[in-house]
Amino acid sequence: MTPLGRGVRAGMFLRSFAVQGSWNYRTLVGAGLAFSLLPALRAVYGRRGERLDEAVRRHAGVFNSHPYLSPMAIGAIARLEADGEDAAVVERFKSAIRGSLGTLGDRLVWAGWRPVCLLFTLALLLVGVPWWAGVVGFLLAYNTGHLLLRVWSYRLGLERGKGVAEQLRQSAVPRLQRLLTVAGAFLAGVVLPLVASGRLVGLRLELPWALAAALVAFLGARYGAVVRRPIVIGLVGFALVGLFLQIVR
Amino acid sequence: MAIVLLRVDERLIHGQVVVGWGSSLHPDRIVVVDDELAGSTWEQELYTVGLPAQLEAQFATVEEARRALPGWLADPARVIVLTRDVRTMRRLAEHALLRGHEVNIGGLHYAPGRHAILPYVYLSDEERTEMRRLADEGAVVTARDLPGSRRVDLGQLLGRH
Amino acid sequence: MNWLAVALLGGIVGLDATGFGQLMLSRPLIAGTLTGVALGRPLAGLAVGLALEVFALVILPVGAARYPEVGTGAVAAAAAHVDAAGAAAPAPMLLLAVAFGLVWETVAGQAVILSRRQNERLVAGDRTLGALTARSLERRHLGAMSLDFARGALVALVGALVGSVLLRTLAPYWALGSVAALGMIVVGGSGMVGATLPLFGGWSERKAAFVVGIVCGLLILLLA
């Protein structure tokens, strides 16, 4: 059993920010995982040599995770390697964890924390909060949550190794996720009238425009993300028509 | 029939299955057929972390699954059956147990010795043989990652590369 | 225009989106405003960033899905907007900057796909995987990140240049007036805000929170 010193632990945590640095369609973040694990692998297998390189190749295969939860995988794999766990067991741990960390992070962050923070910032900016306060406030608030998640998940991985699942299930994550969706729906409601009234472009619009906006918003709420493409095409098309009319005249 | 999806996917339970297929098939239960996983509690716990509360997960060996299969077919509960490789699915299908059923190849990713067939399907020579044997048992083998994407049939899968 | 600042921002934003950090400097709201700050017109950057942000809310970077790259697109559109200011009335200028941003996001998304294919050759090629060493892996991984930075810089810079020329030459021809130009952004933007509801569980699960939110939003409008 190899102890993972403070420098090794800090090194892996910092490298975890670059876990997606060589994202590719074949091994996804595999190389990034091996890159992040290197401080621990060097502590276990020596600074250089064939045993180290063999361990690197083992970890450079397919892997995926939500970036903010990748420290959990990195911490747990480092723990297993340091404890001298069998390579086959480490591989099975990686297969088992990768789908779960992706699903969990997507729901918690990409469909939760991020849009909630953004909608809140949009609401503030649209009621007249100065631009610098909105931008700085967003970056501070969002990244406080972001960093807490990374630190928490890293500690969990380092401490629990293979047993992270039990802790995850008992943690506040499922409740938090639910709370974020309620907050998100509420904030989407708050932002909608602010946008539709014309504040998005610093204008008070006449009623017909606001009604059109309400109708399109209804379609959006009904059909979700699939409305983006037609709306974008409609907007770009409208811009082109508005230019074309004058040019042909 | 209450088996709504038979799928080979080495990631087993993950977003594409739970959210991607789940939202159009509305399954009640996911059964993972795998001899090793069926006896390993710590791995089962990891695989089921991201699962929504209303979706039940079950792990079975190939033998258990073969015995339970007629029951699943008759059961009104909607079941998704997953294996991590083609070989396990072929063993499940032996003696024409899955005759006429569609087997979905959903995710076999890059590994040394495997060649790219589709962006989400890489196959070794051994897996191509297993796939043919699976078809010989009467299963209809097709590849499709998500319900909305194009279905690729066995001939196209084995014909490529 | 300060081309160096645009390239630098494009590189940072391009890297932040996936390769390093995900501190959300790559959100259109932040990237657009920072571009405005760098070019001396924060509010012009903010206006483009706000609109593009609303259009980016529903895009989720899930799995291997392919999506537009909103960060570098916003840098390019905001830079073009600042650079071309004064060539026509502000309203059509904003509409065209937003429309250009929405188009350039998809161009930038294509560049991301190319860079991910390049990464595949760098760190996951048949021969590479079997011959990796600790040092070669580190070198290749950091190399991939440097290329990603260069990609972001290039995409933002070319976008700013193309956008600026387009806005200067086309905006004076706008035929439909200011209200229509801004109204179109508002109508589209409202649809995109509505489209975030399914992200949080949809109407069936979250109608109470959504309706209470709308009432609060209307109250804010009345009181302000």
Image (spheres, coloured by chain):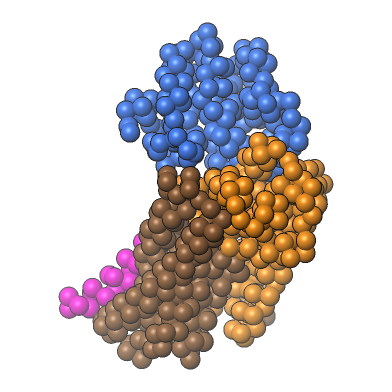
Chain colours: A orange, B blue, C brown
Q: In this view of the protein, which residue sits in the foreground, C162 or A72?
A: A72
Q: How many marks?
A: 0
Q: Quadrant of residue A163?
A: top right
Query: With C27 as the anchor, is A76 left or right in this view?
Result: right
In reply to whether residue A236 is colored magenta, the answer given is yes
Seen at 66% across and 23% down, the residue is B35
Residue A62 percent location from the top left of the image: 54, 45
Q: Position of residue A86 (x, y in %)?
A: 70, 38
| Image vertical order of residue B10 relative to residue B90, above or below | below
Left-right relation of B22 to A80:
left
- Would residue C177 be seen by someone viewing this image from the given angle? no
Task: Give the quarter of the image for residue C7.
Answer: bottom left
Q: A247 left or right of B52? A: left
**Residue at the spot 54% in from the left edge and 25% down from the top edge:** B6
**Viewer-nearest residue: C51 or C134:** C134
| Residue C113 position in % (x across, y down) | 40, 57
In the rendered image, the residue lying farthest to the left is A248
Residue appearing at x 27%, y 70% in the figure: A241
- Residue occupying the point 33% across, 71% down: A239
Magenta highlight range = A226-249
| Residue closest to the far top | B95
- Using the image as rendered, state which of residue B56 and residue A74 is in the foreground: A74
Task: Using the rendered image of the protein, determine whether residue B159 is visible from the camera's viewpoint.
Answer: yes
Q: Is residue B73 magenta?
A: no
Instruction: Tell me where residue C110 appears, x and y as whole percent.
Output: 37, 60
Q: Nearer the viewer, residue A209 or A47?
A: A47
Image quadrant for the C terminus of chain A?
bottom left
